[in-house]
Image (cartoon, grey):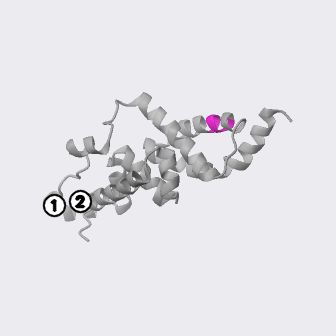
Amino acid sequence: MTASELARRRFAAVALPHLDAAYSLAKALAGNGPDAEDIVQEACLRALNALERQEIEQPRAWMLTVTRNAALTFLARRAPPNPADIGDLEREGRLTAPAPGPDAEARLIAADEGEALRGALAALPLPLRETLLMRVTHGLSYRDIAAATQAPVGTVMSRLARARAALAQALGDKR
């Protein structure tokens, strides 16, 4: 059996079961389906190439990491660079949700709660959004998220707290 044939078999066992999760993460990071499809296609190519020479212990976390990295490459080519760290975002005021307007009740009636949540998620800075999605949507551990994002576990915990606080503020949660 050639290395390529072995990689294809390993791809079917390791990556294919996690394509839905990869697409979900890619769509949340990119903001739309067509870009998410391109990202997942690139992630699959990267995964196939990596499986020729690499053993995978945690397939789900690994596939989401590959997808995240493909998404970051895709987004970097498409958009101007983001500030380098969360502190920069705070100083720029990009972590603060706008104050609710005087007609909050009319906005709530007009907007579906699901749309409000999707909008609030989309408004989060990418480092916060990807960390929150990997934890809440995909159930990755802090350690797996840290490995995927190449950030310390403490940073992952901080990003989760900030993302949750920003969502609560954006959605008007007064807990």
Question: In terms of image quadrants, where is residue 113?
Answer: bottom left
Q: Residues within 10 Å of mark 1 (few under 14, many from 20)?
A: few
The residue lying toward the viewer, choosing from 144 and 106, is 144
Q: Quadrant of the N terminus?
A: top right
Outermost residue to the left: 102
Q: CA distance from mark 2 to mark 1?
A: 7 Å
Q: Residue furthest right?
A: 1
Cβ atoms under marks 2 and 1 closer than 8 Å: yes
Callout 2, which amino acid?
Arg
Circle 1 — which element?
Answer: loop
- Residue identified by numbered label 1: 103
Pointer 2 local density, CA inside 10 Å: few below 14, some 14–19, many at least 20: few
Residue 126 highlighted magenta (yes or no): no
Magenta segment boundaries in residue numbering? 44-48
**Magenta region's main secondary structure?**
helix
Q: Is residue 56 left or right of residue 42?
A: right
Against 99, residue 48 (above or below) is above
Residue 107, numbered label: 2
Q: Foreground: 117 or 164?
A: 164
Residue 9 image offset from top left, x and y in percent: 78, 43
Q: Give the amino acid at mark 1.
A: Asp
Residue at 45% x, 48% y: name it: 28
Residue 151 picture location, percent across and down: 43, 46
Q: Is residue 118 visible?
A: no
Query: x, y (%) of residue 160?
Result: 38, 57
Q: Is residue 10 left or right of residue 82?
A: right
Q: Residue at x 38, y 44 (%)?
A: 126
Q: Which mark is residue 157?
A: none
Q: Residue at x 38, y 46 (%)?
A: 127
Report helix, strand or loop for mark 2: helix
Give above or below for 82 relative to 63.
Answer: above
